Amino acid sequence: MKPVKSTARWDDWTALAAGLVVAVSWIWHQTIGPPTAALFLLGVAAVFMAVLALTHPDLIATEAVMIVVGLGMIVAPWALGFTGVAPMAWTAWILGAVIVAMGAIGLPQAIALHRRPAAH
């Protein structure tokens, strides 16, 4: 199977960038603790899923998990109790929504590539 050019996958590159920003956001939020660690891990998970989506564009699970990771970011401020730390909460809400949207955009593309017959 011939790999698809990853540069055509702008949605996965956007998710990768958003995940990186989330993962390093603790630096400018100047926070330490379990909520910060959770947000860091969610960012790393988004980066990992985006890299997998870029390197294996026909894997449906990468886009689906990316959506779940983004939803986890959106829910994290309430679930982990950091809604009072506005910059950190807004980072989670906005970039979580971006990651959900990028996963939703990439899902039909991955499904289409997955269904395409392999070239011999």
Image (cartoon, rainbow, N blue to C red):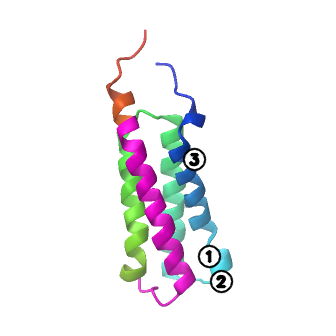
Q: Position of residue 88 (x, y in %)?
A: 54, 79
**Magenta residues?**
80-109
Dot 1 and dot 3 residues touching (CB under 8 Å): no
Dot 2 and dot 1 residues touching (CB under 8 Å): yes
Q: Which residue is mark 3?
A: 13
Q: Is residue 60 above or below residue 70?
A: above
Q: Position of residue 118 (x, y in %)?
A: 39, 17
Secondary element at tag 2 = loop
Q: Is residue 86 magenta?
A: yes
Where the C terminus falls, by quadrant? top left
Q: Nearer the viewer, mark 1 or mark 3?
A: 3
Q: Nearer the viewer, mark 3 or mark 2?
A: 3
> Residue 5 is drawn in which quadrant?
top right
First-in-chain label (3 vs 2): 3
Q: Position of residue 108 (x, y in %)?
A: 35, 39
Q: At 39% across and 67% down in the image, what residue appears?
A: 72
Q: Is residue 100 above or below residue 8?
A: below
Q: Which residue is mark 1?
A: 26
In this rendering, does residue 62 appear at all? no
Residue 117 located left or right of residue 82: left
Q: Amino acid at mark 2?
A: Gln
Q: Residues within 10 Å of mark 3 (few under 14, many from 20)?
A: some
The numbered disc on residue 72 is none
C-alpha gap between disc 1 and disc 3: 22 Å
In this rendering, does residue 32 appear at all? yes
Q: Which residue is mark 2?
A: 30
Q: Is residue 29 above or below residue 68?
A: below
Q: Position of residue 84 (x, y in %)?
A: 48, 90
Q: At 42% across and 62% down in the image, what residue appears?
A: 70
Q: Is residue 73 above or below residue 110?
A: below
